[in-house]
């Protein structure tokens, strides 16, 4: 049976939809890799989709989302014009894709940490990448920062660069890895050690996005993206894979 629906346990998406400085920051780094055909796995409520599609020039953008409530919000956003006509909305996981469907890029924007078997997920995603296409992952960094907030929104893990070094098959080549948001790293560490908060408030998110993200954007570059709250990786599909 093909899996088409799954309930998303986290309800933080509405609050994080407002952090536009942060979204524009990491979006600017992945735009060169998107191409014309984009698959966004776990599109949520479309807040990242809206930013990316406004900055890029994709001809086809497939929003794949398992949660039925989020699907309704995506459809509403498209109907209101927040998402372009090039966006296709489909409920489900990678299992609902046709074998022949191929994309220039596959995106996991704060999604891979929600998937229990992340290694199998990456291998399946690679099978839907055209040769020369890119698989892009933005995920929370550092297992030692795992907190009540991570548990509350259904995270299985946080990542380090070394956790991605393991092979996902010889068809994928890691071409870029960066840690982003060094100031956010300090906030996350404070929450882990002192506050133990399961959900940041809108006021806290606004302060981080308005004042700290711009600082991170400058300092991250100075420290050569060696540490930060999030990790951003880009893989290139080097050739057609077999036996997936």
Image: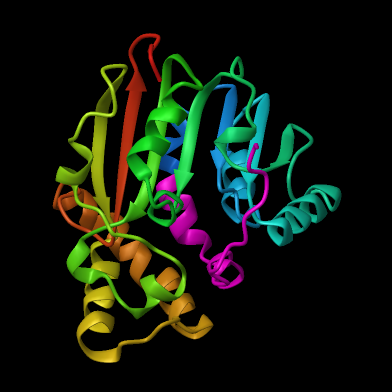
The structure residue drawn at horizontal position 37% and vertical position 36%, both measured from the top left corner, is 120
170 shown above or below 3 = above
In depth, the one of 223 and 86 nearer the eye is 86
Numbered range of the magenta stretch: 1-27
The structure residue drawn at horizontal position 42% and vertical position 25%, both measured from the top left corner, is 126
Q: Farthest residue toward the right?
A: 79
- Residue 228 in the image: state x and y as whole percent: 23, 59
**How is colour applied across the structure in the image?**
rainbow
In depth, the one of 77 and 40 nearer the eye is 40
Task: Using residue 226 as the reference point, say whether residue 140 is left or right of it.
Answer: right
Q: Quadrant of the C terminus?
A: top left
Question: For residue 241: magenta?
Answer: no
Question: For residue 2: magenta?
Answer: yes
The structure residue drawn at horizontal position 44% and vertical position 71%, both measured from the top left corner, is 210
The structure residue drawn at horizontal position 61% and vertical position 46%, both measured from the top left corner, is 49
- Residue 148 in the image: state x and y as whole percent: 35, 80
- Residue 165 in the image: state x and y as whole percent: 18, 36
- Residue 22 in the image: state x and y as whole percent: 44, 59
Where, by quadrant of the figure, is residue 3 drawn? top right
């Amino acid at each position: 049976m093909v899996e088409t629906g799954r309930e998303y346990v986290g309800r933080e998406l509405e609050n994080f939809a407002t952090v536009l400085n942060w979204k524009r920051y990491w979006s600017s780094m992945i735009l060169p890799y998107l191409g014309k055909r984009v698959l966004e796995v776990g599109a949520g409520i479309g807040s990242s989709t809206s930013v990316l599609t406004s900055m890029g020039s994709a001809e086809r953008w497939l929003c794949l989302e398992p949660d039925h409530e989020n699907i309704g919000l995506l459809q509403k956003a498209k109907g209101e014009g927040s998402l372009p006509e090039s966006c296709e909305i489909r409920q489900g996981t990678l299992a609902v894709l046709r074998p022949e469907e191929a994309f220039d890029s596959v995106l996991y924007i704060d999604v891979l940490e929600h998937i229990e078997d992340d290694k199998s997920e990456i291998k399946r995603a690679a099978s839907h990448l055209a040769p020369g296409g890119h698989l892009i992952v933005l995920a929370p960094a550092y297992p030692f920062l795992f907190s009540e907030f991570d548990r509350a929104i259904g995270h299985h893990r946080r990542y380090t660069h070394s956790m991605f070094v393991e092979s996902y098959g010889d068809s994928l080549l890691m071409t870029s890895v960066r840690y982003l948001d060094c100031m956010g790293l300090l906030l996350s560490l404070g929450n882990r050690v002192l506050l133990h908060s399961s959900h940041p408030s809108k006021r806290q998110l606004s302060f981080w996005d308005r004042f700290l993200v711009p600082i991170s954007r400058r300092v991250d570059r100075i420290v050569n993206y060696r540490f930060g709250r999030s990790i951003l990786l880009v893989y290139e599909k080097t050739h057609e894979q077999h036996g997936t």
